[in-house]
Amino acid sequence: MNSLTDDLKALLHALIWYSKLKIKYFAHRFETFKNLVKELLMEGRGAHQKRFWHGSIIALLIVGILTSGTFGGQSLISSSYPGIGGPDPRFVTAYEPFPNGLIIQDFQDTHTNISVKPRAEIIEYPVESGDTISSIASKFGISQDTIKWANDITNVNSVKPGQTLKILPETGVTHTVKSGDTLESVAKKYSAEPQAMVDFPFNDIPDDFSLKVGQVLIVPDGTPPQIATPKPKPQPKYLAQGPSSPAFSAPGGAQFIWPAGGGITQYYAWYHPGVDIANRGAPGIAATDGGRVMVAGWPDSSGYGNRVILDHGNGYTSLYAHLSNIYVSVGQTVSRGQLIGQMGSTGRSTGTHLHLEIHFKGVALNPLAILK
């Protein structure tokens, strides 16, 4: 019996020894094969790189052409949703009077005209032959006055080739913060909205709205205080009609109403994908269309503060931000015109107002392309 046990132990030890030997052998062969494959791949690395990148660029170019309307037409998105990236409605000349005295714009013929990527810095532009203040302003997507104010130009015909001009990243003026300056005082000085300075992403204004001496601020839509004559032509003011407004049609069969009444203090821009409706009375906010509540509260630390987001079930969603009170909960179904909250000033907000956004399939639209 002992002899049989000893034989089994010896056999087991032999099997273990043999298994270890084979494992080491195959591991060595595997490492040798792996190193060979690696060397082959390293040797051929980059052989197809140019071909890959050229193919990718061509594919992107084709997509860009198909969506830009290069061949005489509009892209699918811009033709259906003229509000996307559209111009600031205050700088469009085609206005029509509304029957109740409000001034609105016909947005059906607006289109996107993107000249440069968003930028933070003030650049220097050397004037070229044939350049005018008008053509330079159009090239950089800012107003002519912005160029004149930044460069102390009084005569538009005085611009000559070789001259270097300061070009701001946004229509308006710049301000270098001095001791005692506040967001409100700077906005008042330049007849601008403090919220616009907060929303401009490159101003680097902290959540407590404190300003640093020497900090250079972009004041969107600001006007130099020393400009007395000639006075800038007053721009038409938009007024939100409130929940009693008629339902306005949107592409895809959607219907929207104004969620609140008040003055529109900030318009759609590349850095501000909606409109701000201000009303010191802090009225209730109505659902611009029926839908299901996706967000209700302050779920993160973003500048929206208290907000409600509705899914309208047809590709459209709407967002209502800076609310002081919220009357609905997540998952609740609401109808068009139903009160969902109260106008407030939570989050990165400088005063009582509603920030309204309308999205279609994830793309932000200019609400004024729908709400007339």
Image (tube, helix red, strand yellow):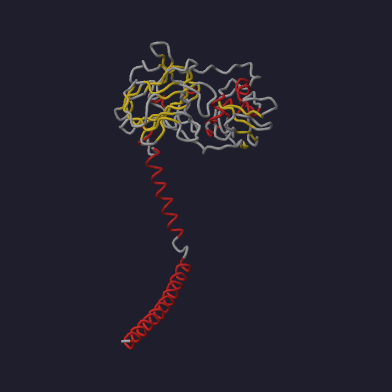
Give the number of callouts.
Answer: 0
> x%, y% of residue 62?
39, 46
Identify the residue shown where x is 41% and y is 21%.
285
Identify the residue shown where x is 33% and y is 32%.
331
Q: Nearer the viewer, residue 93 or 183?
A: 183
Q: Is residue 128 left or right of residue 10?
A: right
Query: Is residue 70 positioned above or below 220 on the image?
Result: below
Please identify the residue farthest to the front as the structure is shown.
Answer: 1
> x%, y% of residue 27?
42, 75
Q: Quadrant of the N terminus?
A: bottom left
Q: Is residue 157 left or right of residue 32?
A: right
Confirm whether residue 189 shows in the render.
yes
> x%, y% of residue 17?
40, 82
Q: Quadrant of the C terminus?
A: top left
Please tell me in which quadrant of the rendered image residue 318 appears.
top left
Identify the residue shown where x is 46% and y is 59%.
49
Please tell me in which quadrant of the rendered image residue 103 appears.
top left
> x%, y% of residue 13?
38, 82
Please identify the residue farthest to the top as the structure is shown.
Answer: 100
Please identify the residue farthest to the right as the structure is shown.
Answer: 179
Query: Is residue 320 positioned above or below 95 on the image?
Result: below
Please identify the residue farthest to the left as the structure is shown.
Answer: 253
Q: Is residue 248 left or right of residue 150?
A: left
Identify the residue shown where x is 42% and y is 11%.
101
Please tell me in which quadrant of the rendered image residue 334 appears.
top left
Q: Is residue 301 left or right of residue 6?
A: right
Confirm whether residue 80 shows in the render.
no
Query: Is residue 242 positioned above or below 127 on the image?
Result: above
